[in-house]
C-alpha cells in the first residue's frame, strides 16, 4: 500500500474536531459588557456624534419588518434599468428612513438630510445594519 | 444563541422556564431587554443548569 493511501486512510479515521465556539464579539459584534449595559450605537452625521440606544425585543421586531420590506424592494430592483435608479437615488432614502425608525425619532430625517454627507449616511447605515443584523445574517446561506 | 433563534427558544418552552427562574413577566422582557441581552441571559441560565452541554 502506498504512503499516500495510508495517509488518506489515517485522515479518514481521525475524528473531525468540533468547530471553535465563536466569541460574543464575533456573534454580536459587541462585547458582553456592551450588551448587558445597552451601550448605544454611535452614528456620525455632519461631523457630530449621535447615540442610538439598541431597540428592545418588541421594537426590534417591528424594525426588522421594515428592514425586510426594504430588502424585498431592493431585490425587485435588480433589473439593470431599475438598479441604476434605485442604487443611485432611492437607496439613500431607504437608509434615512430605516435609521430614523431605529432611533425612534431621536435622529430626524431633516437632521440627516441637512447635515450628513452621503459618505456619512452610508457609513451610518453599514454600522446600523451590522449592529442589528450581524447575528442572523452570518447564519444565512 | 443569535437573536432570531431566541424566537425558537420561546416556542421550545425555554422562555417559560427562564421566566420562572428569573421571576419576570414576558411583557417586562419584551419591552426592556434587547435580543442580545435575552440571548446572553438564556445562555447563562442554561450554562448554570447544564454546564456539560452549554459550555
Image: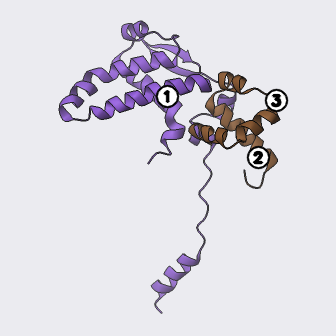
**What colour do you see for chain B?**
brown
Earlier sequence position, callout 3 versus callout 2: 3
Residue holding disc 3: B23
Q: Picture quarter containing residue A68?
A: top left
- How many other residues sit within 10 Å of disc 1, few (<14), some (14-19) or many (≥20)? some
Pointer 3 and pointer 2: residues touching (CB < 8 Å)? no
Q: Are marks 1 and 3 on the same chain?
A: no
Q: Residue at 80% across / 32% down in the picture?
A: B22
Q: CA distance from mark 2 to mark 1?
A: 29 Å
Residue holding disc 2: B47
Q: Give the secondary structure at mark 2.
A: helix
Question: Chain in purple?
Answer: A
Q: Are marks 2 and 1 on the same chain?
A: no
Q: Give the secondary structure at mark 1.
A: helix
Q: CA distance from mark 3 to mark 2?
A: 18 Å
Q: Give the secondary structure at mark 3.
A: loop
Residue holding disc 1: A64
Measured as percent of width and height from the top left, residue A40 is found at 59, 21
Residue A70 visible in the picture: yes
Measured as percent of width and height from the top left, residue B43 is found at 71, 42
Pointer 1 and pointer 3: residues touching (CB < 8 Å)? no
Name the subunit of mark 2: B
Measured as percent of width and height from the top left, residue B31 is found at 66, 21
Q: Picture quarter containing residue A38?
A: top right
Compared across the picture, whether B15 is left or right of A61 comes to right
Q: Residue at 78% across / 27% down in the picture?
A: B24
Extreme-left residue of the structure: A81
Name the subunit of mark 3: B
Amino acid at each position: 500500500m502506498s504512503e499516500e493511501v495510508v495517509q488518506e486512510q489515517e485522515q479518514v479515521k481521525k475524528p473531525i474536531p468540533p468547530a471553535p465556539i465563536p466569541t460574543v464579539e464575533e456573534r454580536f459584534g459587541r462585547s458582553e459588557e456592551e450588551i448587558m449595559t445597552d451601550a448605544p450605537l454611535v452614528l456620525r452625521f455632519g461631523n457630530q456624534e449621535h447615540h442610538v440606544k439598541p431597540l428592545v425585543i418588541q421594537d426590534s421586531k417591528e424594525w426588522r419588518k421594515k428592514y425586510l420590506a426594504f430588502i424585498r424592494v431592493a431585490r425587485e430592483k435588480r433589473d439593470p434599468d431599475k438598479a441604476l435608479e434605485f442604487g443611485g437615488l432611492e437607496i439613500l432614502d431607504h437608509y434615512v428612513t430605516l435609521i430614523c425608525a431605529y432611533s425612534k425619532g431621536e435622529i430626524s430625517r431633516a437632521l440627516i438630510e441637512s447635515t450628513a454627507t452621503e459618505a456619512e449616511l452610508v457609513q451610518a447605515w453599514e454600522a446600523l445594519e451590522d449592529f442589528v443584523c450581524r447575528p442572523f445574517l452570518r447564519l444565512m446561506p | 444563541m443569535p437573536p432570531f433563534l431566541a424566537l425558537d427558544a420561546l416556542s421550545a418552552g425555554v422562555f417559560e422556564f427562564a421566566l420562572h427562574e428569573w421571576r419576570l413577566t414576558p411583557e417586562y422582557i419584551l419591552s426592556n431587554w434587547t435580543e442580545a441581552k435575552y440571548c446572553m441571559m438564556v445562555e447563562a441560565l442554561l450554562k448554570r443548569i447544564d454546564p456539560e452541554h452549554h459550555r
